[in-house]
Image: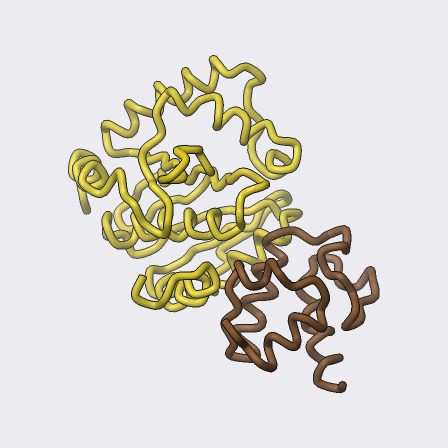
Chain colours: A yellow, B brown
Amino acid sequence: MLQGKDRFEIVGRSLPCHKYGCMFRLVEPGDASFIYKLRTDSGLSRHVNSVSNIVEDQVKWIKDYKSREANGNEFYLISVDPVTGSRQGVNRLYDFKDDSFELGSWLYLPNEDISKSILGDIFAKELGFEALGFDFCTFNVRKVNLSVIRYHQGYQPDLVSHDELNLYFKLTRAQFNRNKIKYLKICGYGENA
Amino acid sequence: MEKMLEFTQKFKDQYIDADTFEMSPETEFRQIGSWDSLTGMAVLVMIKDDYGVDISTETFKTLKTVKEVYEMVKSPKN
């Protein structure tokens, strides 16, 4: 298993990264207003944990996150349009175990092309599986978030458990690699993207 | 016609509330209340899985009715 400093080094070498027509980098405190906007959007925030209603708390959260990042315990990605520089959305990898990572915080601007959101999700998974070498990832989805559940099921993950609120999934590297191709193609990227 | 109706049913099944509305080939599918961009992605995946046809999100944006999508599936140009 990679140690935290190794993970930090690998991610540091991998990012920023231009891929799938986007630029991916690690979140910085200067991104707080954008993330706050995402997390308080009435449509998007229905299915995520609530946040404090002031931007300053988001800045503090990111500053705390940066020390978890430096220890290689969590990586919060932001997708930026490489031409305009505008921020598009975020993904987060955390809770690293011997052979797995947790995926979460998948939020993209509602008026963005859905491809950006899908490609951001794929990039985050590639970072976990390919760059960091994990064998599987876990994630949970609110039971009421049906269209997101349907999207994730397109990768044929295993449903591990459920509770009153959430479904808990496990997705292996093989399941991901087998199924990401169709999404990449739909999003305008061929099999060798 | 039968194949188009079968396609329309499969298209409808991609909505999270498919059993609550009617759909015909002439339906403007984005006008259905529960439509969202992930429903669109589910439709494109269904087309890929069931018909072996790739329609890009860019092309899909130009299509309004179920029938227009079906015509694209029958004769893909992209």
Could one spot residue B34 in this view of the protein? yes
Q: Examine the image and state in which quarter residue B21 appears.
A: bottom right
Q: Is residue A79 visible?
A: no
Tell me the quarter of the image containing the N terminus of chain B. Answer: bottom right
Which residue is rendered at x = 46% and y = 59% of the image?
A187
Instruction: Name the foreground residue: A164 vs A5.
Output: A5
Quadrant hosting residue A142: top right
* Front residue (pair A85, B47): A85
The number of discs equals 0
Q: Is A191 on the left or on the right of A149, as rendered?
A: left
Q: Quadrant of residue B32?
A: bottom right
**Could you say where residue B31 lies in the image, as x and y percent from the top left?**
76, 54
The structure residue drawn at horizontal position 21% and vertical position 39%, both measured from the top left corner, is A7
Give the left or right position of residue A16, taking residue A179 as reference.
left
Q: Position of residue B76 (x, y in %)?
A: 54, 77
Q: Residue at 37% of width from left, 45% of height from top?
A: A22
